[in-house]
Amino acid sequence: MKKLLVLALIAFFATNSFSQIDVSQFLSLGKEAVDDIETLSEAYLNPLGKGFATTLSSGWYNTAATHRVFGFDVSVGFTLTTVPSADKKFNLNDYKWKRIIYDKNNYPNPISPTVAGQQDILIPIGVKLSETMQLENIINLPQGANLSAVALPIVHFGIGILKGTDLQLRALPPLTISKYGKMNMFGAGIKHDFKQWIPVVNKLPFDAAIAVNYSKVNSIYDKLTYFPTEVLTIDRANIDNNLLPLVDSKSRIEAEYYSKQELQLHMNSFCANLLLSKSFLFLTVYGSIGYSASESNVQLVGPYLIPTIESDAGSVFLALREKDKMETPIDITMKHSSVRTGLGLRFKFTVVTLHGEFTYQDYAMFNFGLGVSIR
């Protein structure tokens, strides 16, 4: 079990490790572009929020049949969610930028990779404050992780609590891994056999139920070490004197700009499904149709020292001022909702079950699991 939880956290934070580099690049656009930085972050991280939040709605059932009172099932599952090619890139022209600028002559169709994508040519961008005050090519838009899919192991428990009604639970207690960060997960759901209340239909040889569930994940990646001079070249004359020790000192890793920086992700998912299943000896065929809604919040929790754009005697340059420290420069919420459909097979040998399911919900999901079920 411990190894499974470790794998879950590693799979989850594999994407975040790329975000560390990219967040530092986004912040380097400066405090004047903070609104654009959030828009850029949302466009770049979209597959992360959508993919993992979608994955949370998977693996809740492998039959429409419910338990007798105190009957139960325990299963260990694995959901693989594929990332479509459309979500591996985004076009800068699709957004209204307040400050960000790029060369539209050299890049008339400015396609850039999301966190799930990858491409050879990365677009340089800058910031424009006015016709006479702008800096071009401050950073290149970041590379992606070239992810084909995101994965999440799931431990599931269900128990019959009333006639035709199951309580379903999944949980991951607070877990810390030094190389990745912290994560916890909780989910709860109800599955109810509504077919029992419908005359005539309740005699037909199939199972039908309604399932409603909710999942929540909190995670913290606490290995961020962003300081502007590690990413940008800034003249010492344009850095506040009391910040110069941080620029020069090898010990600055101990300063609050490093020790208190975190990337926090909070995701929740709600899902409601109509379930149908039919059993043949040791084989059960099951299907579902339903609706899912999810919300993902990404926060960059500080402090962070953000560069600013200044001018003097017609010269435009980047500067570091202590007053430009920000506690939460990025705080974005991504919401997704869609209809979902699924089809699966379950094999049961005495009390041991083995199941596989395909579900489509914006992203294609494949869920596999092994468990024990006592009706």
Image (cartoon, rainbow, N blue to C red):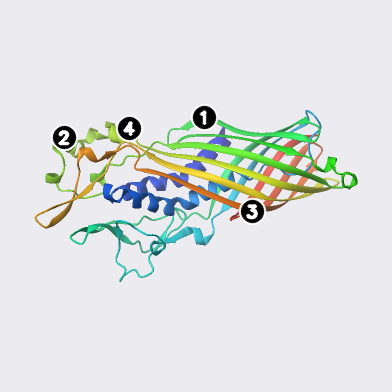
Dot 4 amino acid type: Ser
- Secondary element at tag 2: helix
Q: Nearer the viewer, residue 197 or 281?
A: 197
State left or right for residue 59 relative to residue 253.
right
Against 164, residue 341 (above or below) is below
Q: Residues within 10 Å of mark 3 (few under 14, many from 20)?
A: some
For the residue pair 118 and 61, the one nearer the viewer reads as 61
Q: Is residue 255 left or right of residue 108?
A: left
Give the mark nearer the N terminus: 4 vs 2.
2
Q: Earlier in the sequence, mark 3 or mark 2?
A: 2
Is residue 1 in sight in this rendering? no
Q: Nearer the viewer, mark 3 or mark 2?
A: 3
* Cα separation between marks 4 and 2: 19 Å
State left or right for residue 344 relative to residue 111: right
The residue that label 1 is drawn on is 174
- Residue 246 coordinates in the image, percent (x, y): 21, 36
Which residue corresponds to mark 3? 339
Q: CA distance from mark 2 to mark 1?
A: 39 Å
Specify few, some or many for label 1: CA neighbours under 10 Å numbering under 14, 14-19, or 20 or more: few
